Amino acid sequence: MEQTISLESLFRILRKNLRLIVISTVVGTILAAIITFFIMTPKYSASVDILVNRKQDNAVTNQLSDQQADVQMINTYKDIITKAVTLDPVRKEVKEQLGYSVTADELRDMISVTNQQNSQVFSVSVKDTDAARSATIANIIAKTFKKKVAKILEVNNVSIIAKATKPKEAVSPRKKLNIAIGLVVGLFFGVGLALLSELTDHNVKDMEYLTDELGLTKLGMVGHYHTANSKKKKGRSRAHRSSTTHTHRQTYQTTNALTNDQAKVATSSADLTASEPVQPIVKTASSQITAPQASSRSNRLRTNDDLPRRQSQKRI
């Protein structure tokens, strides 16, 4: 069954997977930055400008024809520069001056020749990982080419008008361009992954899929009871009952403890009462005197009465 996505559904999918798209974009940008700054080796380009021009004479017709011939010869000069007739002497001189060994194929890949349309000037550029070495190799190529052309074609119409200088900045990698490419690639990868996950998901999410896509008739809807919510509610009720039971248990233990303490206090009071008998109180008009106090007073009175008798007995 062919599945189509409307514009509204597309926006809904993108909004649903927004986090995935953002993460993919950020990851793509970070990877591009890491590759650009830490993995890719920077390369420098140095260029030397060469003029192809014959000696002028007084005839205007001959001058124009010579210029046209020189322009057409530039393509031939390009081939001579990239052939072994020029590259082999360049390789030897580079090894002598710089101590740098390079094969003919590697040197050919380093060289590029460009010129403007209908211009007698063309440029020879050399790319290398070392800035100073690229300028030196470009100047050696221009000098060797000038010598070889004079011998091969027997013409002396080549002049070096601008020598190569040491470049200050690398021409590759292009940092801003690489980071922008990483951002775009990460963005499209996230969008594609979101669409793929949505298209491969065959779960029924709404009633329209059953009625519109499958052609089924809608008879009614049955409420769905979430078991996860019921388990949470059961867990909460159990936790509430356990906490309530624990609270009641603590209250019961506290009440028992208080009752036992009260019983101990009552028992100690009863023991104290049993060990010390209750003393009766004798009430008088002026004060209250207990029985032990009254007995001690009567004893003192008796002692005072018997004192003269004892003294008389001692005299006898």
Image: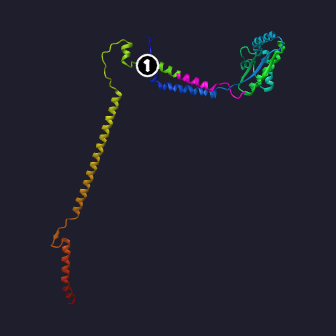
The foreground one among 114 and 109 is 114
Residue under circle 1?
8
Picture quarter with the N terminus:
top left
Q: Looking at the image, is 302 positioned above or below residue 203?
A: below
- Residue 177 is covered by the magenta coloring: yes
Q: What secondary structure is found at the residue carrying circle 1?
A: helix
The foreground one among 144 and 307 is 144
Residue 65, image x and y in percent? Answer: 79, 10
Q: Which residues are magenta?
A: 167-187
Residue 66, image x and y in percent? Answer: 80, 11
Q: Residue at x 20, y 82 (%)?
A: 304
> Badge 1, how many Cα within 10 Å: few under 14, some, many 20+?
few
Picture quarter with the C terminus:
bottom left
Left or right: 86, with 249 as reference point: right
- Residue 301 is covered by the magenta coloring: no
Q: Quadrant of residue 185?
A: top right
Q: Looking at the image, is 286 positioned above or below residue 204?
A: below
Q: Residue at x 26, y 55 (%)?
A: 264
* Callout 1 amino acid: Glu
Marks counted in the figure total 1
Q: Is residue 125 visible?
A: yes
Q: Is residue 200 visible?
A: no
Q: Quadrant of residue 208?
A: top left
What coloring was used for the rendering?
A: rainbow
Q: Quadrant of residue 267?
A: bottom left
Q: Residue at x 80, y 26 (%)?
A: 97
Q: Main secondary structure of the magenta part?
A: helix
